[in-house]
Image (cartoon, helix red, strand yellow):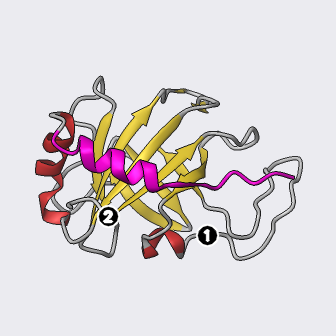
Amino acid sequence: MILSAAYIFKKNADKSKTRLDCIASTGNYEEFEMLRAVKDIKETAFRNATRKGSLAVYYTAAPNENYGGIDGRKASRYLVKKRNISGIYKPDAELGFAYGDMYGTGDALLFVERSFSETSDGVTAGSEFVVLVAKGKRHDQLALYYELVNGGLDEEIEKLLSQAKSEVQKD
């Protein structure tokens, strides 16, 4: 198998324009697991609560117009949490697929949008996307993107998504 992990993120937070919460995952990618909350954070007038063990990331635009990768590519968006996680490159914005890599590793990331949309105010409530991990495939991310677009990874994706466990926590 090329893909080794899947994380499903959804826009649940109402106070952050860019926060996405992990609602299900295979839970086996150490780089994401290290980003989980280590303590409860209470809700305030300006932020949503965060529960210990939960995983939230932020889907943001580039911090400034000069921000870009070493190879000259400019990501359309970035996934961040305390630090940059990945640039998100969308060769065709209409398709709902994207690619990137986990900063500081040799791993490729693939992004599959599920009813995902954003406005100038941020990510639309209820928007979802899946992050798929291909360990050690950083240099193959564009080839993997085309394999994803052409359906070559559909069986692997279905298998990983069937293994993903819900992370929705009830009060």
Cβ atoms under marks 2 and 1 closer than 8 Å: no
Q: Is residue 62 visible?
A: no
Which residue occupies 21% across, 61% down? 1
Q: Is residue 142 visible?
A: yes
Q: Is residue 118 magenta?
A: no
Q: Position of residue 68 (x, y in %)?
A: 29, 54
In which quarter of the view is residue 38 placed? Answer: bottom right
Q: Which mark is residue 4?
A: 2
Which residue occupies 87% across, 52% down? 171
**Circle 1: residue type:** Arg
Q: Which residue is labeled 1 in the image?
A: 36
Looking at marks 2 and 1 on the same chain, the residue that comes earlier in the sequence is marked by: 2
> SS of the residue at dot 2?
loop
Q: Is residue 154 magenta?
A: yes
Marks 2 and 1: which is nearer the front?
Answer: 2
In which quarter of the view is residue 154 placed? Answer: top left
Which residue occupies 30% across, 36% down? 97
93 to 140, vertically: above or below: above
Q: Position of residue 31 (x, y in %)?
A: 44, 73
**Which stretch appears magenta?**
152-171
Spatial separation of the CA atoms under disc 2 and disc 1: 19 Å
121 to 136, vertically: above or below: above
